[in-house]
Amino acid sequence: MSRNSEEPVFNQIEQIRTAQGLSRQELADLVGVHYQTIGYLERGEYSPSLVLALRIAKALKKEVSELFSLTEQKKGKK
Amino acid sequence: MSKKNKIYWSLGVTEKGTRALLTDENSKFKWLRSQRNRRVLVVLNMLGIVLVSLGSYYPTLKTNLNLNSATELVVYSVTAIFVIFLFLGTYSFLRIAVRGIADAPDELLDERQIQIRNTSYRYAYLAMGYIVLGLLLLMFFGPELQMFQPEGNDGSYLAIATMFAFAAAPSMILAWRERDI
């Protein structure tokens, strides 16, 4: 299935990143992408590859399942 | 100690130059990156390409305007300089506005940038296919561009405009489609 498929992937990147006091640029540097890509991910406009999802989870010290889901999670839930 | 600046000959870019664009090193061009300004640049770039292509109609225009040779030279030179600067200037700004993604090698891009770059090339390929088809039809059947007739125009400006369009199309599509973040 294409990563551009209609099914959205929800994530908690922004909430967890801000809770940890990281800027988009800092997280981008940690995972090796452009800060704009972090912005697109946070807005749900881009679904990452498995490798990038794992790198983000490692940088934020979370499990991939805590960060990404196929159903929308309540705001503030970490 | 500075690292060696790798040159990507096939893409016509250098590693340092590409990294500088990708990382917004020069913040004085930040204003170019809003979606509105990027779209204005796309329109101006397209205008430049269209004006270059109209050069093929210059002999007809010259006859119709009935200019003397001195005036003709001035009009031709000023117009040519304006059009070249319009295209080259807007194209340079366009590349900065899209951070040079269209011309960057894979190893300097992240996965989303590679994806949008590839998508822009796909659309550019489709668009150029239609444009080239249209130009071929125009050159063969157009009233003023009977390029294979002895007295006909050689269509060289159309060829130059097509070359410009090939170079700029991926950046134009990227600039038009990318959202603000």
Image (spheres, coloured by chain):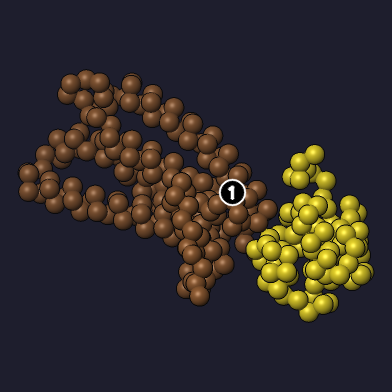
Chain colours: A yellow, B brown
Residue, far bottom: A21
Q: What percent of the width, then of the height, locates residue B134?
A: 42, 28
Q: Residue at x 10, y 43 (%)?
A: B67
Q: Which element type, helix, strand or loop, lies under badge 1?
A: helix
Q: Residue at x 26, y 40 (%)?
A: B55
**Observer able to see residue B30:** no
Circle count: 1
Splitting the image into 4 quarters, where does residue B135 fall?
top left
Please report the residue visible at 7 percent of the width from the left and 44 percent of the height from the top.
B69
Q: Is residue B78 left or right of residue B164?
A: left
- Residue depicted at x 82% and y 77%: A20
Q: Quadrant of the C terminus of chain A?
A: bottom right
Residue A60 shown left or right of residue B125 in the figure: right
The residue pinned by badge 1 equals: B117
- Chain letter of mark 1 equals B
Residue type at the position of mark 1: Arg
Q: Identify whether A64 is placed above or below A25.
A: above
Tell me the quarter of the image containing the N terminus of chain A.
top right
| Image quadrant in which you'd find residue A66 | bottom right
